[in-house]
Structure formats: structure tokens, C-alpha cells
């Protein structure tokens, strides 16, 4: 049986696969999606879909206004997660993102403010890579109204704590 996670207790050290428990959860800072974000993402990605870049077209779309790219929403969620103190404590213990699943539930519009609710899901020790394990991290992205705009699962390969550490 594990003890409850105390962030203050862990501030001076790194968090490994062994240090996090299924069911733990945290909330990220918030961030407002701007027109500049959408324009810059269109330029970076090459995705100039009219729903994102043409206000006249978007008014006639069922959304009634321009929407942020779904991939932009994911990118912002990734950044918000990295700003969480608990996630930063995992720096150096995360090897790689190995899988990502996403279901977009609602559009994100210019001016919406989003945040991430991070919850630790299933953990499995790796048989192929001894000393590592996979951690399923649910990142629920919500807007300023508390509505889920995207439900995502990020599977991360992490290192286990070395014996005697």
C-alpha cells in the first residue's frame, strides 16, 4: 500500500516511475488561446484550413466562428502540463512519449481559456526494457466553462528508481 503523494516532500528530488501512483491528479495553470496563436500555428504547420483562418467562412460554418486547430489545442495542453511542478519533477525520469490518443469533444475558439487536468492511469513495468515502466497519463483539457474540449491519453516511458537511491 502506497502513502499519499506530498509535493512538498518531493520538491528537492526527482520523481521516478515508482514514485507516482495510479489515480493521482493535478491541475495545470490556465492559458487563453489568442488569434496570434492560431495564425502562428497555421504558418508553422502549413494548415491554413478556412475554419481556422477565414472569419467570413467560419461565420457560415456550424461553429459560427473561427476555431483553433485541434493540434494547436494539444500543443498548448502539452505546454501547460510541463508548467506543472509535479510534471517538472519527472524531468530526467521520462524517456519518451510512446503513444498518444485523443478525442476532441468541443471546439476551442479564439479567446477561450483552457487548462489540463492530469491524472495518472495504469502503470506497467516494462519486460522489454528492465528498469523502466509505462505510465498512462490522462490529460483532460477543459475550457473556461469547465467543459471537456479534448480527452487525451499520453503513454510515457519512465525510468524506475535505482535500488539504494
Image (spheres, rainbow, N blue to C red):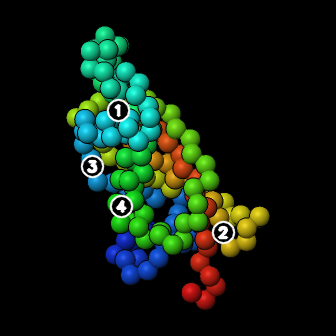
Q: Earlier in the sequence, mark 2 or mark 3?
A: 3
How much space separates mark 4 and mark 3, taking CA atoms?
11 Å
Q: Hey, which quadrant is residue 164 in on the image?
A: bottom right
Q: Position of residue 130 (x, y in %)?
A: 73, 71
Q: Where, quadrant-wise, is the C terminus in this rendering? A: bottom right
Image quadrant for the N terminus? bottom right
In the picture of the structure, the residue carrying the numbered disc 2 is 132
**Which numbered circle lies on residue 84?**
4
Answer with mark 4 or mark 3, whichever residue precedes in sequence: 3
> Visible in this render: residue 148?
no
Q: Earlier in the sequence, mark 2 or mark 1?
A: 1
Q: Which residue is mark 3?
A: 30
Q: Residues within 10 Å of mark 4 (few under 14, many from 20)?
A: some
The image's mark for residue 25 is: none
Q: Name the residue nearer the viewer: 45 or 117.
A: 45
Say which label, 4 or 2, has the lower sequence index: 4
- Classify residue 129 as left or right of residue 4: right
Please give the residue where the numbered disc 1 appears in the rendered image. Answer: 68
Q: Quadrant of residue 72?
A: top left
CA distance separating discs 4 and 2 = 23 Å
Residue 74 in picture, x, y percent from top left? 43, 43
- Which residue sits at x=38%, y=38%? 43
Residue 67: image quadrant is top left
Secondary element at image label 3: loop
Q: Position of residue 96 (x, y in %)?
A: 58, 60
Amino acid at each position: 500500500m502506497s502513502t499519499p503523494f506530498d509535493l512538498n516532500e518531493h520538491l528537492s528530488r526527482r520523481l521516478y516511475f515508482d514514485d507516482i501512483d495510479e489515480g493521482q491528479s493535478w491541475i495545470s495553470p490556465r492559458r487563453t488561446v489568442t488569434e496570434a496563436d492560431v495564425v502562428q500555428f497555421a504558418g508553422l504547420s502549413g494548415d491554413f484550413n478556412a475554419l481556422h483562418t477565414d472569419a467570413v467562412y467560419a461565420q457560415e460554418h456550424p461553429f459560427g466562428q473561427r476555431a483553433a486547430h485541434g493540434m494547436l489545442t494539444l500543443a498548448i495542453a502539452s505546454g501547460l502540463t510541463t508548467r506543472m511542478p509535479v510534471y517538472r519533477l519527472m524531468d530526467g525520469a521520462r524517456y519518451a512519449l510512446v503513444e498518444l490518443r485523443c478525442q476532441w469533444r468541443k471546439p476551442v475558439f479564439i479567446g477561450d481559456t483552457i487548462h489540463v487536468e492530469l491524472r495518472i492511469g495504469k502503470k506497467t513495468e516494462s519486460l522489454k526494457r528492465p528498469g523502466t515502466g509505462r505510465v498512462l497519463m490522462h490529460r483532460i483539457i477543459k475550457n473556461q466553462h469547465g467543459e471537456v474540449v479534448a480527452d487525451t491519453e499520453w503513454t510515457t516511458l519512465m525510468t524506475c528508481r535505482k535500488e539504494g537511491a
